[in-house]
Amino acid sequence: MRHGHCHATVEIDGRLRSYIFGWLVGYSGFLGPIAGVLICDYFVVRKKFLIVEDLYQRNGQYEYSGGFNWTAVAALAAAPPSLLLACCIHPCASYTTTPGS
């Protein structure tokens, strides 16, 4: 009886680990592009120069069309399909297996 309980615990632990790693990979697929847009905007577009007062003002330099920078939105929208394509070409099998299997 005790062995059956231990096996069930390992099975649940394996499914939970697979779920958590799958969720983390999916979540990073959205956070990575957001970070990429922010980093590129700061270092490449603005060359590390910001007017801090304009960050908090209406009609300042950093207010975009309706509050959205559509170039950044397009870059962000292009990221998840490319991630899915990359996962189809080379599946992340190492995230769903347990060590030693």
Image: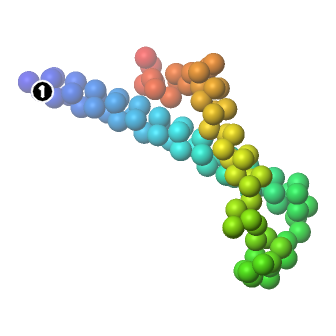
Q: Is residue 98 above or below residue 79?
A: above
Q: Residue 66: x percent and y percent?
A: 69, 67
Where is mark 1, residue-wise?
A: 2
Q: Is residue 11 above or below residue 23?
A: above
Q: For the residue marked with disc 1, what is the amino acid? A: Arg
Q: Is residue 77 above or below residue 97?
A: below
Q: Is residue 47 left or right of residue 21?
A: right
Q: Quadrant of the C terminus?
A: top left
Dividing the picture into quadrants, the one containing residue 64 is bottom right
- Asked whether 43 or 61 is in front, the reply is 61
- Asked whether 17 or 39 is in front, the reply is 39
- Helix, strand or loop at label 1? It is helix
Dividing the picture into quadrants, the one containing residue 2 is top left
Q: Quadrant of the N terminus?
A: top left
Q: Residue 60: x percent and y percent?
A: 80, 78
- Asked whether 24 or 8 is in front, the reply is 24
Q: Residue 29: x percent and y percent?
A: 60, 41
Q: Residue 95: x percent and y percent?
A: 50, 28
Residue sitting at x 22%, y 24%: 7
